[in-house]
């Protein structure tokens, strides 16, 4: 099995597990993943910077996390459409992804707008323009994979601590949980067999300490 295919299937399995936590029949709920994607595109631009009337320094780490957030919704959309499952990925989608991970990089802001436009136009996740964004930042597929695992763990942690009913506190000690995730994950080895479990435990320890 090809390396990219292996990583996609692993992420699909994790995404399906998380989506079932949100709703057991998540793929039948008509969730507007396209809407979540274009809103995440706006958040990505805010982190990277777009205001010409003030000095802004691109926050690359948070920009990467926004692209990873978009991938969560895009992957869910592809799974619901039947292009990907936890056990299978159709040939055309796999080829689109593998082709999309190489090529020349464009300007990030333009690629973000192109992805939002394509997503809104089709009301569906657009694979080619998504990888245009990745190249522009840049963000490799391997970094997408490692970042996805971290954010998936954080999303699961949020659900376990009341995210759906509104009781979860997203800012820990005045710092957003995404930033805690970046710091904690940098101290762990992705290739550790129980990486996800160690990351979850570390998040929980810090969360309890800062409440």
Image: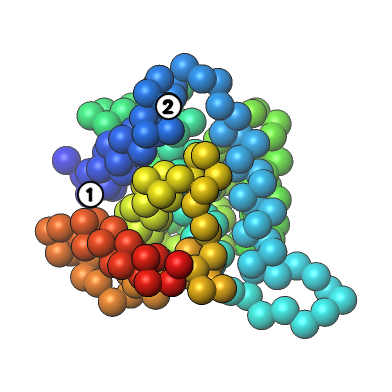
Task: Say left or right for 203 vs 3.
Answer: right
**Label 2 crowding class (10 Å Cα cut-off): few <14, some 14-19, many 20+?**
few
| Position of residue 147 measured from the top left corner of the image (x, y, whole percent) | 38, 59
Task: Say left or right for 170 vs 184.
Answer: right
Name the residue at the right extreme: 53
Name the residue at the left extreme: 193
| Residue in the image at 35% along x and 58% along y | 150
| Position of residue 39 measured from the top left corner of the image (x, y, whole percent) | 66, 46
| Residue in the image at 40% along x and 20% along y | 25
Q: Which of marks 1 and 2 is nearer the N terminus?
A: 1
Answer with the quarter of the image where residue 12 lies: top left
| Residue in the image at 52% along x and 57% along y | 169
Query: In terms of depth relative to the viewer, which is nearer, 128 or 119?
Result: 119
Query: In terms of depth relative to the viewer, which is nearer, 172 or 64?
Result: 172
Image depth: mark 1 or mark 2 in front:
2
Q: Is any part of residue 22 visible from this angle?
A: yes
Task: Say left or right for 162 vs 90.
Answer: right
Residue 194 position (above or below residue 210): above
Q: Is any part of residue 107 visible from this angle?
A: no
| Residue in the image at 21% along x and 56% along y | 197
Task: Say which element carries label 1.
Answer: helix
Q: Residue 3 carries which label?
A: 1
Distance from disc 1 to disc 2, alpha carbons, whole Å, reads 30 Å
Name the residue at the top extreme: 28
CB within 8 Å, label 1 to label 2? no
| Position of residue 85 measured from the top left corner of the image (x, y, whole percent) | 31, 28
Q: Which mark is residue 23?
A: 2
């Amino acid at each position: 099995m090809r390396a990219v295919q292996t990583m996609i299937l692993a992420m699909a399995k994790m995404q399906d597990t998380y989506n079932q936590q949100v709703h057991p029949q998540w793929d039948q709920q008509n969730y507007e993943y396209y809407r979540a994607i274009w809103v995440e595109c706006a958040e990505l631009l805010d982190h990277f910077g777009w205001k010409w009337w003030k000095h802004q320094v691109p926050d690359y780490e948070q920009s990467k996390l926004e692209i990873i957030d978009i991938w969560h919704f895009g992957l869910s959309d592809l799974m619901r459409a039947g292009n990907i499952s936890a056990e299978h990925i159709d040939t055309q989608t796999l080829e689109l992804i593998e082709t999309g991970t190489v090529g020349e990089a464009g300007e990030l802001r333009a690629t973000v707008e192109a992805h939002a436009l394509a997503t809104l136009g089709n009301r569906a996740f657009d694979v080619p323009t998504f990888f245009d964004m990745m190249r522009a930042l840049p963000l490799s597929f391997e970094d997408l994979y490692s970042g996805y695992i971290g954010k998936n763990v954080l999303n699961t942690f949020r659900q376990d601590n009341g995210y759906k009913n509104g009781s979860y506190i997203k800012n820990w000690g005045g710092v957003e949980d995404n930033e805690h995730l970046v710091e904690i994950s940098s101290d762990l080895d992705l290739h550790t067999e129980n990486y996800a479990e160690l990351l979850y435990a570390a998040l929980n320890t810090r969360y309890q300490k800062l409440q």
